[in-house]
Amino acid sequence: MKKNIYYVYVYLDVSKPGKFEYGEYTFDFEPFYVGKGSNGRDRFHLKGSNHNKEFSKRIKDIKESVGIKPMIVRIWEDLFEDDAYSIEWKMIKTIGTIYSKNYKGPLMNKAFTNVLDVTVFGNPSIKTYIMEHPYVPVQEICIGKYRFISFCENLKLDSKKLIKGISDCGWSLTIV
């Protein structure tokens, strides 16, 4: 049974106050990370996570410059995991990352550097998936590497062949 124990959170840089507007999202401090989690996941990064060294350094720099930790705000709560993923993805795309060519912004999420940008050409199973997941643009699916592998497994596609450019399902794959 699925549980609605997930939330979407954002890290704000308290050393950079102001009015930061990104589509429907407005912050009093510069956002620099968006995540999805349950339990205490939002506080996990304060311990010095190894998954993104630049992000960990930013947290340390903020603590040293203003003497306090970054602000962590839970934007959405009581979510099912799929909903939390879709909201997280939408926020990252709307706000943008420092790593992305296509979605420039202040976030340090590496979601759009490890992204597999998949353009769909006439695959009915993909169209069905997209219709069931309206937060994904119809001509483009941008998901992280591990979610992409899971996505392929769910659709019974060979992710290894797709990554190598071998496709019998009508996909054109570009790693950005």
Image (spheres, grey):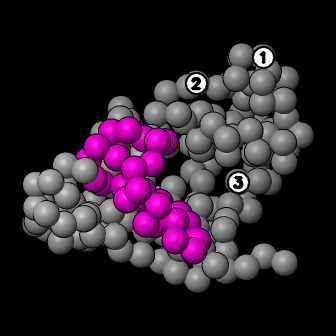
Regarding mark 3 in the picture, which secondary structure is present there?
Answer: helix
* Distance between mark 2 and mark 3 Cα atoms: 19 Å
> What's drawn in magenta, residue-wise?
32-59
Regarding mark 2 in the picture, which secondary structure is present there?
Answer: strand
Tell whether 98 sits left or right of 149.
left
Report the amino acid beneath label 1.
Ile
Please tell me the numbered disc located at residue 49.
none
Q: Disc 1 vs disc 3: which is toward the camera?
A: 1
- Membership of 81 in magenta stretch: no
Label located before the other in sequence (1 or 3): 3
Query: Mark 1 = which residue?
Result: 166
Look at 52% across and 80% down and name the residue there: 77
Report the amino acid beneath label 2.
Thr
* Distance between mark 2 and mark 1 Cα atoms: 12 Å
Look at 34% across and 70% down and name the residue there: 72
Label located before the other in sequence (2 or 1): 1
**Residue 120 vs residue 86, the one in the foreground:** 86
**Residue 122 vs residue 104, the one in the foreground:** 104
**Marks 2 & 3, CB-CB < 8 Å contact:** no
Inspect this view and state whether residue 34 appears: yes
Please tell me the numbered disc located at residue 130.
3
* Distance between mark 1 and mark 3 Cα atoms: 22 Å
Query: Mark 2 = which residue?
Result: 174
